[in-house]
Amino acid sequence: MQGTLISTNISRNVMNTFLKKIFFFITCLFITSIATAQNKGIVPLTGLRYFSEGISIKDDIDVMIDGAHLLSNRIPLNKEMVLILHQPMGFTTDSKKTIFAGAEVSFLSPKGELLYIEPNNLANKITTGFTPKDLTKFSIKFTLPAAATKNYNNGLVQIRLYDLKAKSQLRMEMPVTFARQGEQLQVSKMVKNIKSTDAAKATICGLQARSMKITVDTSIQVAPKMAYTSVDISNIKGTSISGIFSGKEIFWVYDNNLNEIKITDMLLKQVKGAMENNDVDYMLKIPYRLKTVNTRIYTVRFRWESPDKKQVIDVVVKNI
């Protein structure tokens, strides 16, 4: 009897250990899937928002014009732009791993009126589909005709990438203003990312920076009820202390659904540097929520640009 009891206890222990290992394995897979596929977010430089509904991206989204990165959301009319999605995932595949995708391109007025729509920008690929190699840098080329804007100066470009064999899709939307004819566009072929955590993405142009550290600061007494996103960018090269102070700064805060939240409190900053080599350390304190509200996810975006708009720092941080 005692031997049977000991055997039963051993079996239970073995089973518990096994279940714990299975739970740990499933948890790791779950965390990995979240880390490697972005479900929703905001892209630096253009402020493009994306929402995964079955189709997600592993890396990022670029907006290109004439082979250069668009540095703002000011776009030209009657000129081809290219939206590049790095490794989109979630499509249905056939036996040859071919995927069949469509892309709807539309434009809405500031009042929300649908002024232009192209139901399937990828119609020429309906029969042949796309190979896994095509998904490495998946491109959607589109042109917004001036006649479709009805003399509006701004609006919302919407692009919907969808699976022709299923209901999965990836929605993207970019608030835009229109450049005047002959206006020099804010573009660059030299765009880099600043090394940081997975929760933050920073893009820099015309400058160099060693790294970026993100924390949440609840100790600031300027606005004692607010929590701040602390952005510490170290060893910026290519400018000076006075150069940073002369630039333009703006920030945005979004809720979990990426709806903008109006924040009336001021951004705080500290700029330090070494006189002998002009390396600059740039610390920002961005108010984004009340200290008492710490269970929701917020997205904070900060942008700095030089007076000539050739140097840009654009940071997007997701935190609680």
Image (cartoon, helix red, strand yellow):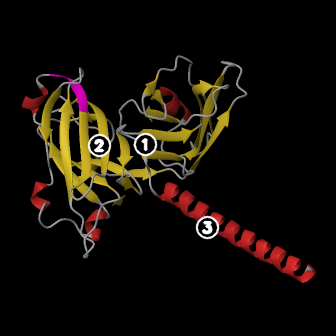
Determine if the magenta segment contains residue 155.
yes
Neighbours of disc 3 within 10 Å: few (<14), some (14-19), many (20+): few
The numbered mark, 2 or 3, whose residue comes first in the sequence reads 3
| Image quarter of residue 72 | top left
What residue is shown with label 1? Answer: 41
Question: What is the C-alpha distance between the residues marked 1 and 2?
Answer: 22 Å
Give the number of the disc on residue 187.
2
Main SS of the magenta part reads strand
Image quadrant for the N terminus? bottom right
Secondary structure of the residue carrying numbered label 3: helix
What residue is shown with label 3? Answer: 25
- Count of numbered labels shown in the rendering: 3
Of the residues shown, which amino acid type is indicated by label 2? Val
Q: Nearer the viewer, mark 2 or mark 3?
A: 3
Secondary structure of the residue carrying numbered label 1: strand
- The residue at 14%/49% (across/down) is 120
